[in-house]
Amino acid sequence: SHNLQLLISFLESYGDGNAKGLTVEELSDETPGCIRIIEEFPIDLFTRLGNKTYLDWLPQTILFPIEERRIRVLNRPALIELKKNSFREKDQIDSVTLQRIENESK
């Protein structure tokens, strides 16, 4: 897909370029799981999150500025939804913290 190729091109040029060699096939919907790219901070790429596709999550995204560009990331309520049911303790702690920030921002 054109959008996946744009994402890969950006990631290859971002930071130290640790995404070099990433392919469209690795990001296809038929390849579930997570790809982690380590730069200044870890970048996790999922083809599905909580059994939802990118298009399912799209209404719950915001544009986030990175190096004169803007990328879509999940908004706080979507992150809370995903993390609160996770088996990982860190995700559950993140969910509580994000919920507290969400409540304080209202």
Image (cartoon, rainbow, N blue to C red):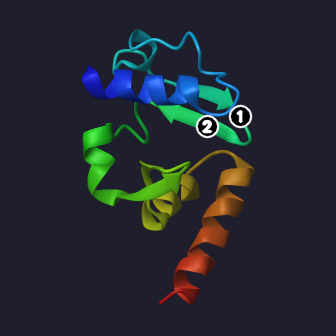
Q: Is residue 55 above or below residue 12?
A: below
* Neighbours of disc 2 within 10 Å: few (<14), some (14-19), many (20+): some
Q: Is residue 38 left or right of residue 20?
A: right
Q: Is residue 67 left or right of residue 8?
A: right
Residue drawn at the location 42% of the way across and 42% of the way down: 50
Residue 63 appears in which quarter of the rendering? bottom left
Tell me whether circle 1 and circle 2 mark residues in contact (CB < 8 Å).
Answer: yes
Along the line of sight, the residue nearer the viewer: 8 or 25: 8
Q: Is residue 12 left or right of residue 39?
A: left
Mark 1–mark 2 distance (CA, rounded to whole Å): 7 Å
Q: Secondary structure at mark 1?
A: loop
The residue under label 1 is which amino acid type? Glu
Q: Position of residue 81 (x, y in %)?
A: 47, 59
The residue that disc 1 covers is 39
The residue under label 2 is which amino acid type? Ile
Q: Position of residue 73 (x, y in %)?
A: 45, 51
The residue that disc 2 covers is 43
Residue drawn at the location 62% of the way across and 79% of the way down: 100
